[in-house]
């Protein structure tokens, strides 16, 4: 019993070393053979380990024959993704691509538009009774603006010449004028 456990551990360590050694190959390294690889074996994948990636088992090529290389845990490489080994049929022969680490694509940096939200302009029309004292025309003995000034109009005086509230008292009667802001 102890011998089989020791054998399994040794085989696992060898498989891990072989798969780690395969990582040194560049992605374009390959072996071409005319013999199709056997069907994949079913492997029991243990529970995930923090900081490691599972390297799936695969059929390798050694000494002129397909040799099973069991899966194992490989230390994670930040900024890269692990690509498992694979066989691909190309031009009448089987090409072997060993496992490797591929850099993750870098997302392009796109400047986000800056949106400045301005508070909406709110116009509040106050009734005459709430107008400050300086805005209300003063009732004078001679030709002052009437108490019921319509806030929708401007009021002009000829003597002295000017508009209310710049002219507070009018010697004549106030002339009601339609507003014309320019």
Image (cartoon, rainbow, N blue to C red):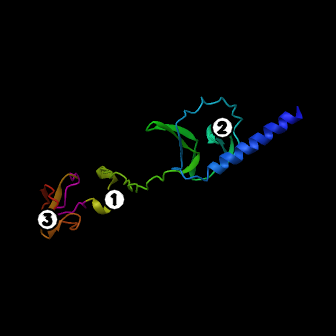
- Looking at the rendering, the stretch of residues picked out in magenta corresponds to 137-150
Which residue is the site of mark 3?
Answer: 157
Q: Looking at the image, is 182 positioned above or below residue 35?
A: below
Q: Position of residue 177 (x, y in %)?
A: 13, 57
Q: Secondary structure at mark 1?
A: loop
Provide the major secondary structure of the magenta segment. loop
Residue beneath the point at 28% across and 60% down = 135
Q: Secondary structure at mark 3?
A: strand
Q: Nearer the viewer, residue 90 or 64?
A: 64
- Identify the mark nearer the N-term, 2 or 1: 2
Q: Residue furthest front?
A: 64
Residue 2, labelled with which disc?
none
Q: What residue is shown at x 68% (from left), y 39% (from top)?
A: 71
Instruction: Confirm or deny contact between disc 3 and disc 2 (CB under 8 A).
Output: no
From this viewpoint, which residue is outermost toward the bottom?
160
Among the two numbered marks 3 and 2 on one chain, the one whose residue lies closer to the N terminus: 2
Image quadrant in which the N terminus is located: top right
Whole-percent x, y for residue 36 in the image: 54, 32
| Residue at 58%, 33% in the rendered image | 37
List the residue tagged with mark 2: 67
Residue under label 1, please give it: 132
């Amino acid at each position: 019993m102890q011998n089989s456990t020791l054998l399994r551990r040794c085989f696992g360590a060898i498989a891990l070393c072989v798969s780690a050694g395969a990582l040194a190959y560049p992605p374009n390294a390959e072996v071409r053979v005319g013999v199709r690889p056997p069907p994949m074996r079913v492997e029991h994948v243990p529970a995930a380990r923090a900081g490691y990636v599972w390297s799936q088992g695969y059929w390798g090529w050694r000494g002129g024959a397909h040799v099973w290389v069991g899966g194992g845990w490989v230390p994670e490489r930040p900024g890269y993704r692990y690509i498992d080994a694979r066989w691909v049929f190309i031009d009448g022969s089987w090409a072997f691509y060993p496992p490797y680490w591929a850099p993750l694509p870098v997302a392009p940096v796109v400047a986000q538009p800056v949106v400045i939200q301005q508070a909406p302009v709110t116009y509040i029309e106050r009734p005459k009774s709430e107008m400050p004292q300086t805005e209300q025309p003063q009732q004078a003995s001679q030709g002052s603006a009437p108490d019921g000034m319509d806030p929708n109009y401007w009021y002009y005086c000829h003597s002295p010449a000017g508009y209310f509230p710049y002219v507070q008292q009018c010697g004549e009667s106030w002339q009601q004028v339609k507003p014309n802001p320019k």
